[in-house]
């Protein structure tokens, strides 16, 4: 599976392994079919490596650029969104895909909470309430020009 390749063969341990049946979503990565295509959140624990051949995979390690955390990572820290950190990579990657979706198709402010819930509402975190995750994600979306109309 993709999760095994990432963690065991490539040493990219930021992507976590949780349930192994694609329910908890801690294993979420972003997959792009071709450069310029939209990002899709993919659960790596049940995705065969053959399914991503020729595609671009971004893990949580790929969010930071030149030593600078991605705005989502910064917001998660600012809002103390996570405690143990195990589910955070899945939330981050689903949120990263959501930002890409909103760049392509902005949403009205009154629908923003619903859109965030659609993106991360099924992610499982046993440590925290989800309010801090949602607050961090919403802050980044509202502060990023062109995502909300």
Image (cartoon, grey):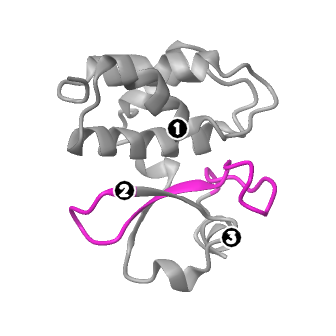
Q: What SS does tag 1 mark? A: helix
Q: Could you tell me which residue is drawn at 48 percent across and 27 percent down?
A: 114
The answer to which of marks 2 and 3 sits earlier in the sequence is: 2
**x 37%, y 28%: residue:** 71
In the image: residue 81, left or right of residue 61: right
Residue 61 in the figure: left or right of residue 2: left
Whether the magenta-drawn stretch holds residue 34 is answered as: yes
The C terminus sits in image quarter: top left
Do the numbered discs 1 and 3 sit on residues whose CB atoms are within 8 Å?
Answer: no
Q: x, y (%) of residue 67?
A: 37, 37
**Residue 39 bears which disc, if any?**
2
What segment carries the magenta color?
13-39
- Residue that badge 1 annotates: 118
Quadrant into which the N terminus falls: bottom right
Relative height, residue 136 to residue 49 (above, below): above
- Helix, strand or loop at disc 3? loop
Give the label, 2 or 1, closer to the camera. Answer: 1
Give coordinates of residue 58: x percent, y percent.
Answer: 43, 58
Q: How far from the left and from the top, in percent, is residue 24?
A: 74, 48
- Compute the Cα span from label 2 to label 1: 15 Å
């Amino acid at each position: 599976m993709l999760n095994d390749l990432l963690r065991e063969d490539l040493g990219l341990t930021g992507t976590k392994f949780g349930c192994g049946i694609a329910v908890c979503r801690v294993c979420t990565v972003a997959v792009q079919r071709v450069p310029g295509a939209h990002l899709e959140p993919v659960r790596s624990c049940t995705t065969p490596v053959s399914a991503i051949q020729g595609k671009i995979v971004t893990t949580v390690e790929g969010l930071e650029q030149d030593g600078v955390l991605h705005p989502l990572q910064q917001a998660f820290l600012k809002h103390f969104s996570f405690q143990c950190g195990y589910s955070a990579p899945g939330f981050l990657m689903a949120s990263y895909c959501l930002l890409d979706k909103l760049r392509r198709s902005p949403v009205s402010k009154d629908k923003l909470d619903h859109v965030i819930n659609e993106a991360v509402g099924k992610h499982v975190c046993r440590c925290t309430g989800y309010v801090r995750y949602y607050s961090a994600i919403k802050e980044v979306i509202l502060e990023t020009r062109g995502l909300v109309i």
